[in-house]
Image (cartoon, rainbow, N blue to C red):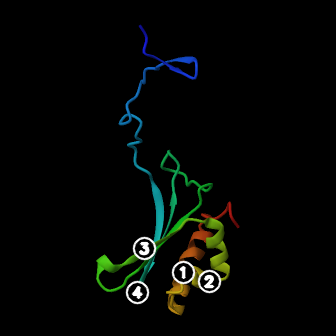
Amino acid sequence: MEDRIEINGVWYVREKQDKTPDDMLDDSPTGYHGLVIENEDVHFELSILMNDDYKTLNYKMGPALVVTFKDGERKNWIEEYWDNPSFLVDVFYDPKLALEETPRFEPKDLLMLKSILGRGIESGWFQEYE
């Protein structure tokens, strides 16, 4: 007899799963290209994912930015993740928008932020969002 269950007068047959949850995990690494700039107070890392061929960039996903504020010891550092490419392009053209997101920025930090975003724009990473 098949494994069956009745729900609201309708009979269902249990389907056999071909894969276990462990089999469904994607164990292939994700490739990316990245840019880093930092000083003693802040660390910026701009990265963009690669396609599965590990040769071409995934422009549709767009780049993401990780900002790390280095407050004293490493365990006290604060990381922020910005993954909206359209916003990052807007920040490049008006870095003061970053202050609205994170008032912790110093003027020198905004120059570094503009520099790393500019390099990403020059490299074509934001081509879907400009």
Lower position in the chain sequence, tag 2 or tag 4 = 4
Lower position in the chain sequence, tag 3 or tag 2 = 3
Q: In percent of the image, x 62 and y 86: which residue is there?
A: 96
Q: Which residue is mark 4?
A: 41
Answer above or below: position of 52 versus 100: above
Lower position in the chain sequence, tag 4 or tag 1 = 4
Looking at the image, which is closer to me, 11 or 107? 11
Dot 4: what SS?
Answer: loop
Marks 1 and 2 close (CB-CB < 8 Å): yes
Answer above or below: position of 21 versus 30: above
- Distance of label 3 from label 2 (alpha carbons): 19 Å
Specify the amino acid type for callout 3.
Glu
Q: Closer to the observer: label 3 or label 1?
A: 3
- Distance of label 4 from label 1 (alpha carbons): 13 Å
Q: Closer to the observer: label 4 or label 1?
A: 4
Q: Which residue is mark 1?
A: 113
Lower position in the chain sequence, tag 3 or tag 4 = 4
Q: In percent of the image, x 48 and y 49: which residue is there?
A: 54
Q: Quadrant of the N terminus?
A: top left
Dot 3: what SS?
Answer: strand
Answer above or below: position of 30 versus 67: above
Specify the amino acid type for callout 1.
Leu
| Residue 71, image x, y percentages | 36, 85
